[in-house]
Amino acid sequence: MAEHETHEFDVIVIGAGGAGLRAAIEAQAQGARTAIICKSLLGKAHTVMAEGGVAAALGTVYAEDNWEVHFRDTMRGGKMLNNWRMARFHAQEAPERVLELEDWGALFDRTEDGHILQRDFGGHRYARLAHVGDRTGLEMIRILQQKAVAMDIDVFMETTIVRLLKDGDRIAGAFGYRRESGKFIEFKSPAVVLATGGVGKAYKVTSNSWEYTGDGHALGLWAGADLIDMEFVQFHPTGMVWPPSVMGILVTEGVRGDGGILRNGSDERFMFDYIPEMFRAETADNEEEADRWYTDRKGARRPPDLLPRDEVARAIVAEIKEGRGTPHGGVYLDIASRRDPEYITRRLPGMYHQFKELADVDITKEPMEVGPTCHYMMGGLKVDAETAAATVDGLFAAGEVAGGMHGANRLGGNSLSDLLVFGCRAGRGAADYARAIETRPEASADQTEEVAREALEPFERTDGENPYLLQQKLQGTMQALVGIIRAEDELHKGLDALGELKERAGRVTAEGNRLYNPGWHLALDLRPLLATSEAIALAALERKESRGAQTREDFPQTDPELGKINIVLRMKNGEPYVDRGPLEPLPQDLRSLVERSP
Amino acid sequence: MGDRSTVTMRIWRGDATGGGFEDHDVEVSSGEVVLDVLHRIQATQAPDLAVRWNCKAGRCGSCSAEVNGNPRLTCMTRMSVLDPAEPITVAPMRTFPIIKDLVTDVSFNYEMAKRVPPFKPKPKPPDGHRMFQEDIERVQEFRKCIECFLCQNVCHVIRDHEENKPHFAGPRMFIRYAELEMHPLDSGDRRDLLQQQMGLGLCNITKCCSEVCPEDIHITDNAIIPLKERVVDRKYDPIVWLGKKIKGRRLAGDK
């Protein structure tokens, strides 16, 4: 038997971004012995990269704002495919969760009269994003991290979980390795909260870091849980495009919220040509009105530059495809000609620094060049809205790894609020579950033995496949064949290529020893990366329509019948199986909210 | 630098038992940063080269190292600022124990963070807290910290003095203390702790920390010196200090 250390808890939380930290804080507060397990050092998770803000109907800038409007915007942004129970909890509870951060020491930017300032973002009817310049995520993760430390929650840093353990149908814990030493580690715990984020590293152009390898999606799938909405991968409209080494790094939507506009290579404000029917009534159709909106919210409609992300990303792709892109294959994002330098550097200090340092561009003097970048996974574990419980007993999921909240497309700012609201709910749900069980589950030793043996196989091969090369091939495949614009023949080709890569990943090799060995870590990360990528491609193939982030060239229309179902992925006889599940219809009172005119 | 060229990267390889510099000739494209080149070495020459990184955008503070002797984030160091004619050295941060190659054991910082008495808010008024931008700007500067620990790395109190670590929090933690002390809603007082256990007095204001901060936080001028003043203030006359603090609070409350 592979020797390993063992720890016992009531609740373990996998992932230490906003959702994981918030879940752990709540679980510990509920009296559960809680541990956080994270792949990186504490405070480095992807939440740190969130820039623009956290959406919550605080009503500090526009008193007219309330949870009902936020709910409406979220559902419309998600093309009505959202789990409405989640969207409702989210809109109702986000203000409380944000104000709680202030009680824990957060310092959001202020209004003139001393309240939390809110910023405009795409798809939100009112200025709704509480923020700290363009480093909101850093503020949030630091506050949550410090709260977790103050509560004395155990943290296992630089530890990767490779498999969930089960006792019959129930979760019994998790098994993984410490990245530093390469030694195995087992957690015995009746409740596991997945808060692992997304799978952006499956794509070549991405705003995501190395950690984003679909771990939670795959761990859940392998443990028998249902995944939903996996076809919906969000491409953020504005990532850097030049120089190549920085391609994909995020440029916050706050640039547009604060007055920036999109132009094509011929300097035309092309977004006016891409206003969809659904948003026509509330979107300005000329430049004069769009510009006036920044100072006259009642008399003017919103600029089309602030349409939801799926709409803007598609428009940019179309412009580039039609030959109207910039020299480096993007479009221009211009705030320099519209706001004075002092305003720009105060509101967007991170963007100023990022372009100056990495691209030699002064955004107070010249436009940025931007293009879509893989940013966020709407799909994930199917969960109960109230408790964040997944479809396997003892398993919970919150944040990006959970599905349903955002439907077919997430609005900017709704991720930071999602992870607070459902992180908290998952922590409570997991603690309640752990408290209620009568006999603690026990995982059989053969499970951990099998996982340990598999994990060490790459060291036994002397001339196998290079994991870095395989990851590059995967990224090329997903980008080209399962990207922003999709078609049946390409998706089939993509699945074939993924099948071949899976087979090659079975021959992957690791050089050196187990001490902090990134090649070996990547060899192991390839498994969840491939499993999650396959789920995306399968779901994309099954949804024969265009809706939100899913754009099918061969099915350009939205199909009302497909608006009544989720595509579901689950394991069957060791293979991923595609199913359909009914979407719970929106009750009449909520329907009238959503249909309310702007 | 042209579109593509070849440079020699001289990288420290080894672990806690020892090691040395190893040369890797590697191709570089224009616009690339040191971390890009380290990744290329991993992918093509040394798959087990240990490098800690996350965001590759200067926001997470994971990829700190010493490039040609200068403490830097490798993701924000453009290759074009380095002389390609000479080998470019990349070494791990010296102040922390080596784990492997460029990865060091930074747990000292996390241990020191645990010893910071947490935020202790004043009672919340019925209509919620109010704070004004001008009251929080100073603290917001400290909160830009990405915990890259480069300031800890260059601080000469601990850089070559392992024996000082148990009783010296270091610049990163001093700005953490400063942000709490200057937070408009905090009611705690950490000055005795700073003076007696956290080694605030050991800092002799050489500003090395401020110079390497990738976020341009004025660590010495805006955090450490004001903390030293507050500590001294208290040592001379606590009653005067108490009066000031109460008065200061009332003023803040009046807003």
Image (spheres, coloured by chain):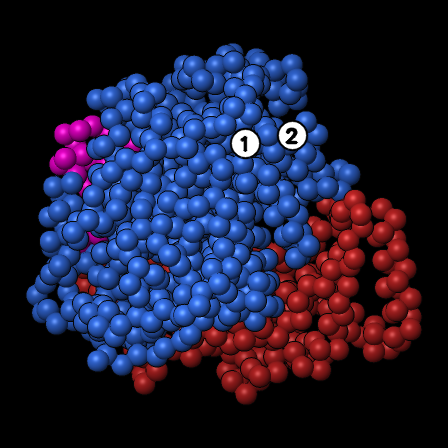
Chain colours: A blue, B red
Q: Which dot, 1 or 2, sits closer to the camera? A: 1
Question: What secondary structure is found at the residue carrying circle 2?
Answer: loop
- How far across and down, in percent of the image, does residue A312 sit? 41, 26
Any part of residue A268 in sight: no
Point out which mark residue A65 bears: 2
Point out which mark residue A428 bears: none
**Nearer the N terminus, badge 1 or badge 2?**
2
Q: Main secondary structure of the magenta part?
A: helix
Q: Which amino acid type corresponds to the residue marked 2 in the rendered image?
A: Asp
Point out which mark residue A71 bears: 1
Q: Which residues are magenta?
A: A469-494
- How far across and down, in percent of the image, does residue B162 sit? 51, 85
Q: Nearer the viewer, residue A159 or A577?
A: A577
Q: Nearer the viewer, residue A575 or A456?
A: A575
Quadrant of the rendered structure where residue A516 is? bottom left
Residue A418 to residue A148: above or below:
above
Question: What secondary structure is found at the residue carrying circle 1?
Answer: helix
- How far across and down, in percent of the image, does residue A467 sit? 19, 58
Q: Residue at x 54, y 21 (%)?
A: A592
Is residue A478 on the magenta stretch? Answer: yes
Any part of residue A88 in sight: yes
Residue A278 to residue B232: above or below:
above
Quadrant of the rendered structure where residue A568 is? top left
Q: Which amino acid type corresponds to the residue marked 1 in the rendered image?
A: Phe
Q: Residue at x 54, y 87 (%)?
A: B163
Q: Residue at x 35, y 79 (%)?
A: A5
In the rendered view, does A276 fall on the left or right side of A480?
A: right
Q: Residue at x 77, y 53 (%)?
A: B124
CA neighbours of label 1 inside 10 A, class few (<14), some (14 to 19), many (20+): many
Residue B221 to residue A361: above or below:
below
